[in-house]
Image: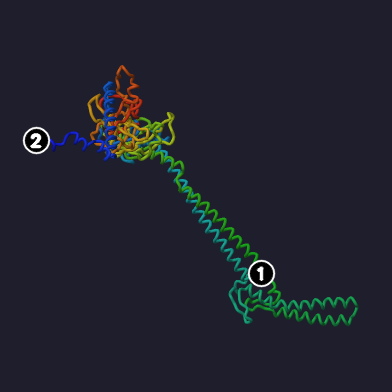
Amino acid sequence: MSEQDKALRPSPMDWLGRHNPLHWVKRHKKLSIFLVIVLVIAAVVLTVRNRAQAVSAALTYQFVRTTTLQKTDLTDSVSVTGVVKSGSSASVTASDSVKTYKVTAVNVAVGDTVRKGDVIAQLDTTDVEKQIENAQLTYNDNLEAAQKSYGQSVEDLSTNLADLQEKLDKAKQDYDTLGLEDYYSSMENTAGATGTNRELVEYYYGLFAEKIAGLENTVANLQIQLTQAQNDGNGDRQQEVQGQLTNYQNQLNIAKGQCSIPELGLQGFDVITQYYNQIEQYREALEQAQKNYDNGVTSNTRQVDSAETKLEQASRTSDTLDTLQTTLEDCTLTATMDGTITALNATVGSVCSGTVATIQDVDYLTVEVTIPTSSVNKLSTGMQCIITSDATGDTEITGTLTRIDPVANDSGAFTATVTVNGQDSGLLIGISAQVEIIINQKENVFTVPRDAIGTREDGTTYVLRKNGGEGVDMTFEEVEVTTGDANDYYIEITGDELQEGDVIRASSDLTQGIESANASESLEDMMAGQMVITDSSGAAMPVEGGGPGGGPGGGGGEAPAGGPGGM
């Protein structure tokens, strides 16, 4: 290289002068500060990881329990046991009136299917039929006597009323004719008077009486004057008054003689007066005849009504006959519902003193269960149920909670009824069954054991997801989650970072499964301020006092991801 070239070649000092880092930092202060912060953080993370590895190396785990995250169903339920019973049943029993009667026929056997009204058994009816025959004869005799009495009463009523009516008609005729039947008619005389004989007598009597009364008054006065003249010894006055008296007496006699009722053939005022005076007697006789008729109607009608009532009573069957007929019907024991004969207690020649047969509907079954007090408030009618039994094996039978007793039994629990859905369930009456009453159910969700949930100081929740290692050497990272519905064992979780197949630590308590620690320092010292778990971004998360959140754990290996829980 020539001296010229050497002179042109820059020296290191020249390059350093031109590229001094201090000059670059001065020109890029903000960028420089940012790079320094990044370097510090990287150094801290590296240091924390190294310390965590050192602590982890010092811990010896006997087991680490995990669960694989997968979509499943979360069920909250109450599990109880009960006994399978018929949805409806009925007992065929003999009534008290036939409990001493012997069985003459049994038409069914246990297991037979019957319809309502089918004859189950027949009792001996010989005695009751004889009693019915005697009672029927008595009934017929009483009915015949009552019919005869009623017919006689009706006849008597007709006869008596006819006689009374005849007398009433006669009294009315006498009142109108005044006994002058030959002249009885409606007439009109020359003066315009019309009517019955009585009305004509009343008319003419009124017409004549005033004139006759005037003459009679005059005669009476003259007789008084004559007596006074005689007493006075006045002969002239006496002779004068006597002449006047004679004259008026003659006028009175002539007037009376001239009074007549030609239409009735009555002549003379005295005769007319005689008939006139009989009017009151005929009126009273008519009133009495009317009263007798009315009383006769009332009396005889009552007799007929009484006889009719007795006939109606006799027409009704007597209580004795009704009772005997009911007893006869009770001798035929019939099914009171459709179903299957599940018990039979009747043989030919025996006496039925209790239940003869039991009928149950084997197509519609129920399970009678007992619910503990701690669970009853969670349940309500209409909830769906899953029923299993030894008789049906692994088959799950659906049902519905249809009744919960409002009052606890002597044991402090509540009896309830679960109705089996559908027919041909395979369940058998009388066997024990297990019932899971579904309170709430979610499908296709992530679930983890409740102990897998950790809670930070700020209230947020997380799970520990495997990010390395195997077995007891697995490492985990925190993944923030949101919790949802839960049962006694599992809880629903959601989170943007969760994926099916993630391996989740079954307990967020990091002390679970630890067998021993480094002899140079206690477990508490190692866990306090030293153990770290990385979050999903790789940032160190200090673990204090035994691990973040969670509860006590146990077991070993991998735990199930979730499933239906019970209470």
Quarter the N terminus occupies? top left
Q: Position of residue 526 (x, y in %)?
A: 32, 22
> Furthest residue to the top?
519
Q: Amino acid at mark 2?
A: Ser
Q: Report the colour scheme.
A: rainbow
Q: Quadrant of residue 228?
A: bottom right
Q: Quadrant of residue 491?
A: top left
The residue lying toward the viewer, choosing from 389 and 363, is 389
The residue under label 1 is 279
The residue under label 2 is 2
Q: Earlier in the sequence, mark 2 or mark 1?
A: 2
Quarter the C terminus occupies? top left
Using residue 69 as the reference point, say whether residue 329 is left or right of it.
right
Q: Position of residue 338 (x, y in %)?
A: 32, 40
The residue lying toward the viewer, choosing from 65 and 327, is 65
Q: Amino acid at mark 1?
A: Ile
Q: Position of residue 226 (x, y in %)?
A: 85, 78
